[in-house]
Amino acid sequence: MAEKLMLHEDRFFDPDPEIRKIARELYKGVKDLPIISPHGHVDPAIFADNQPFPDPAGLVIIPDHYVFRMLYSQGITLESLGIPRIDEKPVETDSRKIWQIFCENFYLFSGTPTGVWLNHEFSIVFGVDEKLNGESAQRVYDQIQEKLQLPAFLPRTMFEHFNIEILTTTDAVTDTLENHKKIKESGWNGKIIPCFRPDGVVNVKTKNWDKNIETLSKVSVIEINSYKNYIKALENRREFFKFMGATSTDQGVLTPYTHQLTDNEAETIFQKALRKKASDEDALLFTAHMLMEMARMSIEDGLVMQIHPGSFRNHNREMFDKFGPDMGCDIPVQTEYTKNLYELLNTFGNDPRLTLIIFTLDESAYSRELAPLASHYPTMKLGPPWWFLDSIEGMTRFREIVTETAGIYNTVGFNDDTRAFPAIPARHDLSRRVDANFLAGLVARHIIDMSDAVRMSRALAYELAKKSYKFE
Amino acid sequence: MAEKLMLHEDRFFDPDPEIRKIARELYKGVKDLPIISPHGHVDPAIFADNQPFPDPAGLVIIPDHYVFRMLYSQGITLESLGIPRIDEKPVETDSRKIWQIFCENFYLFSGTPTGVWLNHEFSIVFGVDEKLNGESAQRVYDQIQEKLQLPAFLPRTMFEHFNIEILTTTDAVTDTLENHKKIKESGWNGKIIPCFRPDGVVNVKTKNWDKNIETLSKVSVIEINSYKNYIKALENRREFFKFMGATSTDQGVLTPYTHQLTDNEAETIFQKALRKKASDEDALLFTAHMLMEMARMSIEDGLVMQIHPGSFRNHNREMFDKFGPDMGCDIPVQTEYTKNLYELLNTFGNDPRLTLIIFTLDESAYSRELAPLASHYPTMKLGPPWWFLDSIEGMTRFREIVTETAGIYNTVGFNDDTRAFPAIPARHDLSRRVDANFLAGLVARHIIDMSDAVRMSRALAYELAKKSYKFE
Amino acid sequence: MAEKLMLHEDRFFDPDPEIRKIARELYKGVKDLPIISPHGHVDPAIFADNQPFPDPAGLVIIPDHYVFRMLYSQGITLESLGIPRIDEKPVETDSRKIWQIFCENFYLFSGTPTGVWLNHEFSIVFGVDEKLNGESAQRVYDQIQEKLQLPAFLPRTMFEHFNIEILTTTDAVTDTLENHKKIKESGWNGKIIPCFRPDGVVNVKTKNWDKNIETLSKVSVIEINSYKNYIKALENRREFFKFMGATSTDQGVLTPYTHQLTDNEAETIFQKALRKKASDEDALLFTAHMLMEMARMSIEDGLVMQIHPGSFRNHNREMFDKFGPDMGCDIPVQTEYTKNLYELLNTFGNDPRLTLIIFTLDESAYSRELAPLASHYPTMKLGPPWWFLDSIEGMTRFREIVTETAGIYNTVGFNDDTRAFPAIPARHDLSRRVDANFLAGLVARHIIDMSDAVRMSRALAYELAKKSYKFE
C-alpha cells in the first residue's frame, strides 16, 4: 500500500498552540524572502551548461555524501550506489537499481535532516505524493525522471524559481573560473559568484600540493620559486576572484591555530615543502601562518574571511584510496579556539576592516569559547551550525546556547552549504522555520516582544547573510 | 501525615496535549514487549540459588552505589549504611536502622533517575502506597519485608513476572560460570547468559593482575608463560563463554586508544608485566593493542564487542582502601574517539563481521565524534546513555543529539546496566516512556509521521537490542 | 512612536498551560523571600558613602562589562562609551551622548539576559514604561535621572527596598576593608560582608605581585621574606576578614590543578618569585599548591572555599593596555576537573569541615565531571551557572544536566555576581522564575510531586545559599 507523503504546513514548529501561532506569523513574514546562499558546493558547470539533470540517482544520491554515508553505515557498498571508483573499476550504472536500494533503505533517514530535506525536495520541487520505500521506488523514479526532462527543471529555471538572489560556489585558488565566465557571458543574470579556497596550496602536506603550486604558478603567471612569489601569486588570484565577483575566502583547517612566522621562517618551510621535505610540524606552522596572512590580505582587499576547522579529513583510508575525498569519511575532532585564535585576534581582531566568520563542528565550544569571543571582538562573527549540526535540533541548540551571550547580531544568518542543488530551497525553508520557532519561543516566554521578533526574524532569514558577506 | 506515593500513568511524557496523546499511543504499543537486557551486573547466583532476598536494605541500598553515593555526598558514612569494609571492621548490621537513614534522606533523590526507579520499584513491584520519609520508614520496611518472604518474590518468579526474555550478566574471563551452569542444569528455562569481561587480565597495572593471570592459566589449562599462550588462553575462554551462551564481550578502559603492537612488542611488555616491571606507558600500549586483538577475535568468533571508556576508577583512594571498587567513586574524564579509534576502525571498521558497540560518559563527543563515526563505519554502533547519563534528560539529549546524524538504526536500543535486580522493569519502563515521548515530539512537529514512529518505537524498545547483540 | 515596555507577569515560564500554572504557584511561594547574595562585585563604598548614583550611564553602562562588551563587538569604541583609559586620554564624558549610543543599540541585547535584566531594572526599579531605542533615549534618561535624585534611590534605601538579607562583596586580601568598617560603624544594619580573594598574592606572575606582597606585609604587619611568613600573613588576613564577617574565600585560577608542594619546594618558588625569576611552570605549581593550602586553612578556620577556574583573563591585549582588567576581554577555556582536583579531593574531600564550591565556564564538564564529583565527595558543592552561563537557558541547562546526577542538594542556590548594584533584584527574580519553571516541568511530567517541588523551590531560592555559605 502506498503511504502518502505530505508536508504539514506547521512542520518543525512546537506543538504548543501559543508558540505555534507566533511561529506561523513570523515564518509567514520571511518565507518568501529571496534566498541568499553565501557558502556552498554547487558545481557552477550546471548553470554554465544548463543541461537537464541526468536521472534521480544522479540528482539525489551520487553527489550527496550525507545520503550515501548513511547507507554505507548499514553495510551497503558505495559501488552498489554507483559512486565512481578512482581505479575506474566497475560500479553500478543502472540508475533504477541504485534508486531501488535507496528507497528500500529510506527509512534509515527517519528523524534526520537529510530525510526532511529530501521529502521537501520530492514533494515541493518534484510533486511526488507518496512516501519512498521499496514498493514505491520505481513509480517515484518515473515521476522525477519525467519532470527532469521538462524545461521548468533546467538548472537556470530552477534557480529563478527558487528565488535565489545570490549563490556562492567554492573554488580552488587555481581554478580559472571558466564556468563563472561562461555564465556571465551567457547574458543570463543569475548571480553566481566564486569563493576563494586556498587549502590545496596552503596545506603543504596535502596530496598534490606540488602540482597545485605548479598550477597556481601557471594561472597567476608568477614563477613560484619563493615564499614571496607564492604570496604574490595568492594576492594575484584574490584580485582575480574579486574581479569575478567573489566577496569571501574560505579555509578548511584541522585546527584554528594561528601564528605569525617571520618571512625567513616562512621561506624556509616553503623551500622545504618544494623539495618535499616539510614535516608535519612545518605544515602545522605554515597553515597557522597562512591564516595570519589571509587575515592581512582580507584587511587589504576586503574579502570576508571564513575558517572551517576541526574536521579530520578522510578518516577511513580504505574508502579514500578507493573513492577519494568528500565521501562521508570526514570526522570531527575536539577544537580549541580561545588559545588558537589568540594571535590572529590580537593582531587583527580590533580592526573594523576585517570580517572573520568562524565555524565549528564542536558544540562544546559554543558557550565556552565561540560566543564569548564573538561578543567581544568586533571582527569576529559566528557561522551557522555546520554539516552534522545543520539540522533542526542542531540549529536550535546553536540559537539557545549562542544567543544569550552573543545576541543574534554577531552571527551571520544561514549558509546552506549544499552539494545537491535542488536541496537549496528545502534547507532555507527549514532554517527559516526553525528560527521562527526559536523566536516564537522567546516571545511566548516574554523574553522579547513581537516587534523584536519580527526584526530578528528578517535579520536571520535574509539581512545578516547579505550584510556579513558584503552583498550590499 | 503519610504522603501518597502514586505513579501517574502519563509520567515522563511532555504535558503538551498533542505530544502526550501520541506518546501514550506509542508507549501502549511497546510497554508489554518482553525485556531484552543485553548488558548488566546482576549476580547470577541469585537465580542459581533462588533464595528470598534478605531484607529491604540488602535489596535496595547495599548493592546499589547509585543510592549510597548520594547519601555519602551529604555526609552520611558508608559504615552507617552497612557497606562492608575490606578490613572487616564493624559496620551497621541493623537493616531497620539503615533503612531509617535512607528514608529520612530519600528527598535527596528528588529529580534523579534513582528516585524515579525506586518509586517504581516500591509502588509497582512491592505495592507500597506511601512516600518514603523518616515517618513512613518502618511501615514501608514491614511491607517490603513481608513481600520478600512470598514465593512470588523469589528471583526466578520475579524474572518471569518481569517478562525478561534474556538477561546478560558481566563476568570476568576467569570466571568458571558455575552459577550459569547451575541455572542451566536446574531445568529452569530463564535465559541468563554471560558476557566476557577481560579487564582484569588486560590491564597489566590492575590490582591482582598477576593473580588473575594465574587463575586464567588454571581455568584455561594453558600455561601462560608467554604472550602467545596468553592470547591462546583468551581465545579458549571466549570459546567457553560462547558455549555457555555469551554473544558479547565488554571492555572497560580509561581511554579508547587503539594501537597494534608487533608480536615482539606485545611479548616484551607481557614479559615485563609478569616480572612486575611494566610501566604506565606499557600498560597503555598493551591495552590499546588488546582492543585490536579483541576486535580480531570478534571477527573470528562473532562475539559482539563493547567498549566502555572514560571512567577514572576509584578516584577516592580512601574509600577504595576501605571498601574496594564499585563504591560510587568512579568519575568520568574527557574522552577522545576520532583519533583513538582510528587504528581499530581503519583495520576492522569496514568488516561486516564485526559489531562494535561504543559507550561514553562524555556527552560532548555525541555530535562531534560518536554520531559521525557510527553513521559512517558499518561496524560501529552507539550504546545507550550510560551510568550518570542513563536518565530522562540524559536519554533525551542522546536521542536529540545523535539521531539527526546517525538515525536510530546505528544505535542499539536500551541497556539497563542494573546491579539491583528488581530495578530492571523500572529502568525499561522509563526508557520506553522516554523514547515514546521523544518520537512523539518528532511526530507532533511533523518531522516523522505516525507509521515511522510506530516502527522506530518497536526498534528502540526491543528489536535493536535483540539484533545488535545477536539474540536472533 | 514610543513602544511600550511591559514586563509580563508570566515571563520566562513555559507557555504550556500546565507547566505555567505550576510555575506560577511555585514562584508565588518564593518571590518575596529575602535575597541572599553570597558572591558578587558591588563596591562597598556606595553603601559606606550612601551618595546618589551619578547618572544613568554611570549607573548602567560604565560599571558593567556585560553591557559595553556587546556594544564593542559591534564596532562601538569604549572611549565613546566613557570607559576610562589607563593613560587618562580623553573619553566621552557627556552622559547623555553615551546614553544615546546605548539606546540606539539596545536592540543588540534582544534575547540576552542583559537585555532582560535591564528591562527589569528600568521597568520595576525606575518605573520606565517605554522601550529603549534612539528615539526614546533622552526621555528615559530624564526619567531615571530624576529618580536617582530622590532619597528612595540612595544605595542603602534601595538595599532595604530590595529586601537583601545579606550581601557579600569580593575583596583583595590586602584590602583593609575600610568601607566595611565604615558601614558597621555607621549604625546602619544592612549586612554587607567581605569575601577573601587572594589571587593578587597567589599567582606569582600576576601584574604587580611584588607590590601586592609588599602591601600584604604592611597590612598584616608581618615581614614577608619567606614562604613561611607569607602563609602566616595569609592566615592573619583570613582571621581579620573573618572578624569582619567574612564566611568565604574565592580564588580565580586558569586551571583547577591542585598539587601539594613540600615546604622546601614552595619556599624555593617563593624566593624565585621575590627575585622576579619565577617561571610559568613555577607559577602553575605555586597556584596548585596554594589551592591545597587554602583548603587546609578552610578546614582550620571554617571559611567556605570557592574556586572559579577556566577564564583566560585579558585575552585582548590592546584593550588590557588601554583600559585594564575586567573589560569584557576574558574568554573561557576548556577546563578539566577530575584529574586536576584529584589531589585536593583525596587530601581533604572526605573531611566534613570543608565546604568547597566549584564553578565552571565549561558546560561540557557538568555531566561528565562536576555532577559526578559533587554527588560523591561530601565537601564538594556546585556553584550556580557563572558569567556567560548566568542566563535563562544557561540555568535551565545546568538544572537539567546536573540535577539527575547530583540532585539539587549538592548545589548552592543562586549567586548574582553583580557589578551594577540595581541589577540584583532583576537577577534574583529571573533565577527564581527559571527554577520555578524547571521544577514545574518536573511536576508536569510527574517526576516529582508538588510537595517535593515546593520544598525544592525554597531551597533553591533561599535556603541552600544561606546554608552553604554558612549564614545560618
Image: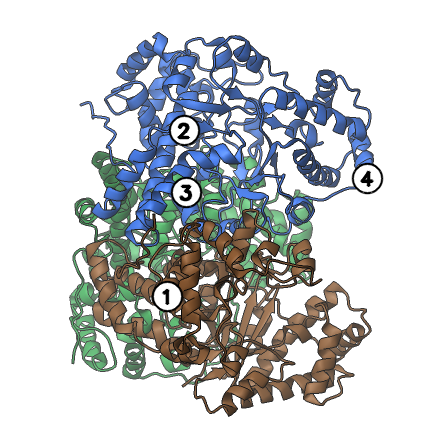
Chain colours: A brown, B blue, C green
- Of pointers 2 and 3, the one earlier in the residue sequence: 2
**Looking at the picture, which amino acid does disc 1 mark?**
Ser
Bin the neighbour count of mark 3 within 10 Å (Cα to Cα): few under 14, some 14-19, many 20 and up: many
Q: Which of marks 4 and 3 is nearer the N terminus?
A: 4
Residue at disc 1, secondary structure: helix
Disc 2 is attached to a residue of which chain? B
Instruction: Name the quadrant of the C terminus of chain C.
Output: top left
Of badges 4 and 1, nearer the viewer stands 1
Instruction: Measuring from the top left, give residue C456's x and y in whole percent.
Output: 27, 39
Q: In this view, does B350 lie above or below C424?
A: above
Q: Which of B411 and C344 is in front in this view?
A: B411
Is A36 placed above or below B85 here?
below
| Residue A406 visible in the displayed image | no
Give me the C-alpha separation between circle 4 and circle 1: 53 Å
User: Three-letter amino acid code at disc 4?
Assistant: Glu
Query: Circle 3 sits on which residue?
Result: B394
Residue to which mark 4 is pinned: B265
In the image, A103 versus A165, the foreground residue is: A103
Measure the C-alpha gap from mark 2 to mark 4: 47 Å
Q: Distance between the residues labelled 4 and 3?
A: 41 Å
Is disc 2 placed on a helix, strand or loop? Answer: helix
Give whichever of A184, A289 is nearer the camera: A184
Residue A379 at x, y = what percent?
48, 77
Q: Mark 2 points at which residue?
A: B71
